[in-house]
């Protein structure tokens, strides 16, 4: 499983994600997106779709090594609007402007490859990749990434 997050400032959003296996991080990313989101849900979808591309790659790697995934890969997100858009295959007035590449997660949810789940903002480990955190929160997320049980 993993998590994704976006920081939605006035400029282009910063996105981040992390994937872990057996309580230790195996992949992570943080970057400033080249396109600008119009709202927080869109920024969160941008982050989730980037995370999904990596998840598909990691699932393929597991399969190549004799460990095919039997269940959907859980992606924890802290934005309920983004989760609703990811789970709804219909285009609506509030989401029709979102570029198709940022809706990749929809295809994976429909195919049963990804399962988005809500997590509270303070418990979203990918926060560490998108914004400066107070020391206590930073240490909490760092320890989770290193496989320590906080």
Image (cartoon, grey):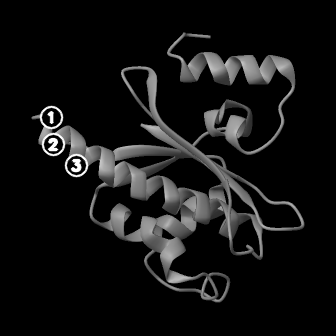
Q: Quadrant of the N terminus?
A: top left
Cα–Cα gap, marks 1 and 3 = 9 Å
Task: Judge by depth and name the residue closer to the eye, 83 or 12.
Answer: 12
> Residue at 77% across / 76% down in the picture?
38
Residue 26 in the image, given as x and y percentages of width and height: 42, 31
Q: CA distance from mark 2 to mark 3?
A: 5 Å
- Please tell me whether residue 20 is drawn above or below residue 148 in the rendered image: below
Tell me which residue sits at (67%, 70%) in the image: 42
Q: Describe the element under mark 3 as helix, strand or loop.
A: helix
Q: Quadrant of residue 133?
A: top right
Horizontal side of residue 106 vs 122, given as left or right: left
Q: Position of residue 112 (x, y in %)?
A: 28, 57
| Neighbours of disc 2 within 10 Å: few (<14), some (14-19), many (20+) | few
Q: Which residue is disc 1 drawn over?
A: 67
Label 2 sits on residue = 63
Q: If the image is split into quadrants, where does the C terminus sit?
A: top right
**Mark 1: few, some, or many residues within 10 Å (few <14, many ≥20)?**
few
Position of residue 30 measured from the top left corner of the image (x, y, whole percent): 64, 47
Q: Which residue is denoted by mark 3 in the rendering?
A: 60
With 3 as the anchor, is 81 left or right in this view? right
Q: Are marks 2 and 3 in contact (CB under 8 Å)?
A: yes
Direction top: furthest residue: 149
103 or 24, nearer to the observer: 24
Mark 1 and mark 2 in contact? Answer it, CB < 8 Å. Answer: yes
Position of 91 with respect to 20 (left or right) is right
Where is 12 relative to 32, above or below? below
User: Could you tell which of marks 1 and 3 lies nearer the N-terminus?
Assistant: 3
Q: State whether residue 51 is above or below residue 88.
A: above
Q: What secondary structure is marked by label 1? A: loop
Query: Which type of secondary structure does the marked residue at label 2 adopt?
Result: helix
């Amino acid at each position: 499983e993993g998590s994704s997050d976006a920081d939605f400032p006035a400029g282009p959003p910063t996105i981040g994600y992390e994937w872990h296996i057996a309580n230790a991080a195996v992949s992570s990313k943080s970057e400033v997106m080249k396109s600008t989101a119009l709202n927080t849900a869109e920024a969160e979808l941008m982050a989730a779709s980037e995370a999904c591309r990596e998840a598909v790659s990691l699932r393929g790697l597991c399969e190549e090594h004799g460990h095919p995934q039997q269940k959907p890969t859980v992606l924890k997100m802290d934005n309920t609007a983004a989760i609703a858009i990811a789970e709804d295959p219909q285009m609506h007035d509030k989401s029709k402007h979102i570029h198709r590449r940022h809706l990749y997660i929809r295809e994976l949810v429909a195919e049963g490859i990804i399962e988005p789940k809500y997590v509270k903002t303070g418990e979203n480990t990918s926060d560490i990749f998108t914004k400066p955190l107070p020391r206590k929160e930073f240490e909490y997320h760092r320890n989770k990434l290193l496989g320590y049980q906080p």
